[in-house]
Image: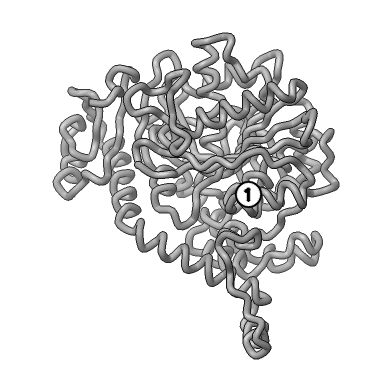
Amino acid sequence: MDGRHEYFCDFMELQPHKGGVRSLLHLLCSGDVAENDAVECPPGTTEDRPSNRWVIFVSVVAQMLLLWVKTPLAKLGGAVEYWMNFFTDNGGGVLKLIRNAMEGKVRIPDRESPNYRSLIGLLDTRIELNKKIKPWHSNYHAALGIMASKIAYENELVIKTVVENHWQMNFLEFFNCWNEFRGDYTTQAFMFADKAADADLVVVAFRGTSPFDAEDWSSDVDLSWYEIPDVGRAHGGFMKALGLQRNTGWPAKIDASKERPFAYYAIRDALKKVLADNPRAKFVVTGHSLGGALAVLFPAILALHGDQDENDDLLASLQGVYTYGQPRVGDQRFGEFVERHLDTPETKRRYFRFVYSNDVVPRVPYDGGAHLFKHFGQCVYVDAFYRAQGMKEEPNKNYFSPAFLVPKYANAAWELVRGLVIGQVAGAEYVEGWVMRISRALGLLIPGLPPHSPQDYVNATRLGAASLDLLLRDH
């Protein structure tokens, strides 16, 4: 037996790898979930409401399907990224590729080179910061945060090259971290500072959901949770990715090997050292998609350990948490715990959750019934015209509301048209390439997927800079 029963006061963990026809039928017909092979929870746990069991059923089925396609999806993703880099490196078109072949100048992509891009990097090729947004502007951290979140999808060499050569900042460390429950390196992040010496700002950026990683998507739709005493329920998959310990939960200190670092502990210890060397510096945590979930969980666990050891509190140096397209990470009690530590009278608001238009990921896991996944903090909602406004919850919070069906598809059509002309209207840096245009066309079938790309979040911080500056100025 692991330590969940001792450390957590309650939990429910979905186990799709143990699911089958019998367990799925049992979910639909019986409230005795503790006896179900696909659900692990304390003995005697029941769920009497059919609607709640249906939500669990859908989550388990979705994860089973994702596990089934895990290997072919990864192979497909590797092939797609390779050939997209191949075409991009050879001019981005068939005719230019033919010309290079005739001249003997065909370029072969190198996956470890500073020029090799992920699908995210190919959807939006911008790597430069917007020079019009200055460090003293109220929206600077939001604009820097989305760019850091976007390049977090790239390999370490690309990230280091962008930070040092393009942003003229100081790259500090890349983290490739172990997930004890999955037995793999599932979590990546990096850290940089605005200056090599006497830094004012340190940024930690977590990598988000990789488009061809079935386990990342499985984490997004997973309804598993653990209840931390005096804190609340938090998403199980995200906590595991951050470094949850199988037998001890969240101890303040662990003995981890250098070969298998855990994200929370490795980043926390590195951050302590950087801040000790730069006593004036504040730090920002950021991430897109799954990376956004990890970005807000990181200070939550810092707060948990701060409550346990007042001399070990990094939160006083936290400047802000900026997330983009972030899924829900906990219940209402968990949100209240985080807000008490992040949005204090002394610091004002420090947590900003950006949601662009119909992005589907901020609307999962399901919010309702006994599962109680709730967003918290300030939602910065950006519409399809890149106008920002502050609100508690984004419209159509669970995505599937019939009232939003027609507007979703109308928005998808508008985004496709907008992508064809935005370069002529807003400038060359906003031109959408052929990869993004294909994505926009696919949005006519699944409207919530293209808006999840960092492309629109970057645009929101630039084209919506005026409304964003006004919104963030008083916080």
Q: Residue at x 41, y 64 (%)?
A: 75
x, y percentage for residue 252?
47, 18
Question: In front here: 384 or 306?
Answer: 306
Name above or below for residue 103 compared with residue 45: below
Can residue 87 be seen?
Answer: yes
Describe residue 136's horizontal placement relative to residue 191 as left or right.
right
Q: Callout 1: helix, strand or loop? A: helix
Render colour scheme: one colour
Question: In front here: 431 or 392?
Answer: 431
Name above or below for residue 185 compared with residue 313: below
x, y percentage for residue 355?
60, 42
x, y percentage for residue 267?
56, 31
Question: In front here: 237 or 194?
Answer: 194
Q: Residue at x 70, y 20 (%)?
A: 348
Describe residue 408's horizontal placement relative to residue 30 as left or right.
right
Question: In front here: 135 or 158?
Answer: 158
Q: Amino acid at mark 1?
A: Lys
Q: Residue at x 58, y 53 (%)?
A: 155
Q: Which quadrant does the N terminus fall into?
A: top left
Name above or below for residue 296 compared with residue 173: above
Name above or below for residue 291 compared with residue 253: below
Q: Tag 1: Cα neighbours inside 10 Å, few (<14), some, or many (≥20)? A: many
Q: Residue at x 40, y 61 (%)?
A: 73
Question: Which residue extends farthest front?
Answer: 258
The residue to which callout 1 is attached is 150
Can residue 397 be seen?
Answer: no
